[in-house]
Image: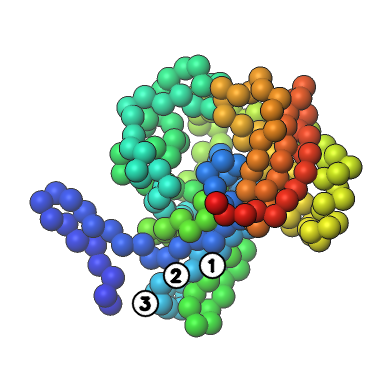
């Protein structure tokens, strides 16, 4: 096996075992937590050295832990104090008391649903309820064991389940849905993603038009009186 983990003078060198293909093409709009958007489907393509033997028995589990790198925030560094969106961006918490992607080692951990595993030229693991940016590097995969890891009555600090916003499609946006032949999976992903209000906390009072890139489209929306209005959809053009 060519894959290895090396340590030199206290520094660890870890190589990804694969990469994720996700509908979230930019940081803005990515589900803030795994499981919040069940319609967010993705897959992990393992490197060729990780053959079928590496996932033998994994299909017996319904959920898996995915450890990954927040690759889009590496250059942004990190701070010891964070303003969590849950607190409206007004209160600071220690980095280790949050799930901010701006972490010292830029490592993330998400619990996602295992849909199926394909084993052809390489191993492809289909998952749902993801909160991954497209092309996220994967470090490790482990099965989720409910009787060991589920703690439904545990304290959870400032993190509380929040009320979802209602999503309204303008007539123009519905016309564009038909024009671009969006199917149910696209429609559900857009609805579920926007219902959790991806806007930055400091712009919660703004009614300006925001743009989120999902799949190959830009979705234009605004929020007025806690209702998300989707005003249009257009093809995404890289700039």
Q: Nearer the viewer, residue 41 or 183?
A: 183
Calculate the distance from the C-alpha at mark 3 to the C-alpha at mark 1. Answer: 15 Å
Observer able to see residue 177: yes
Q: Which residue in the protein does label 3 denote?
A: 49
Residue on which the image places disc 1: 125
Question: Is residue 38 positioned above or below 138 on the image?
Answer: above
Residue at horizontal 77 percent and vertical 51 percent from the top: 187
Q: Relative to the observer, which residue lies in front, 93 or 215?
A: 215
Residue 75's image quarter? top left
Element type at mark 3 = loop
- Please identify the quarter of the rendering in which residue 192 is found: top right
Image spot of residue 212 (x, y percent) = 64, 43
Residue ID for mark 2: 46
Q: Determine if residue 40 is in view.
A: no
- Secondary element under disc 1, as helix, strand or loop, is strand
As helix, strand or loop, the secondary structure at mark 2 comes to: strand
């Amino acid at each position: 096996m060519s894959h290895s983990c090396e340590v030199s003078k206290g520094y660890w060198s870890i190589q990804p075992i694969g990469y994720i293909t996700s509908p979230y093409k930019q940081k803005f709009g990515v589900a803030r937590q795994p499981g919040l958007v069940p319609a967010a489907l993705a897959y992990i393509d393992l490197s060729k050295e990780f053959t079928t033997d590496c996932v033998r028995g994994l299909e017996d589990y319904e959920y898996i832990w995915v450890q990954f790198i927040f690759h889009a925030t590496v250059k942004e560094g990190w701070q010891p104090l964070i303003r969590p969106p849950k607190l409206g961006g007004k209160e600071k918490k220690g980095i280790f008391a949050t799930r901010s992607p701006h972490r010292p080692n830029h490592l993330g951990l998400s619990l996602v649903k295992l849909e199926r595993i394909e084993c052809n030229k390489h191993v492809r693991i289909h998952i749902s309820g993801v909160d991954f940016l497209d092309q996220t590097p994967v470090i490790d995969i482990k099965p989720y064991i409910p009787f060991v890891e589920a703690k439904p009555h545990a304290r959870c600090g400032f993190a509380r389940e929040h009320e979802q916003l209602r999503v309204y499609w303008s007539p123009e946006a519905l016309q564009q849905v038909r024009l671009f032949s969006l199917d149910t999976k696209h429609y559900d992903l857009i609805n579920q993603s926007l219902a959790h209000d991806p806007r930055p906390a400091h712009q919660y009072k703004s009614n300006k038009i925001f743009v989120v890139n999902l799949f190959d489209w830009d979705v234009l929306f605004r929020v007025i009186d806690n209702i998300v209005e989707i005003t249009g959809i257009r093809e995404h053009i890289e700039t």
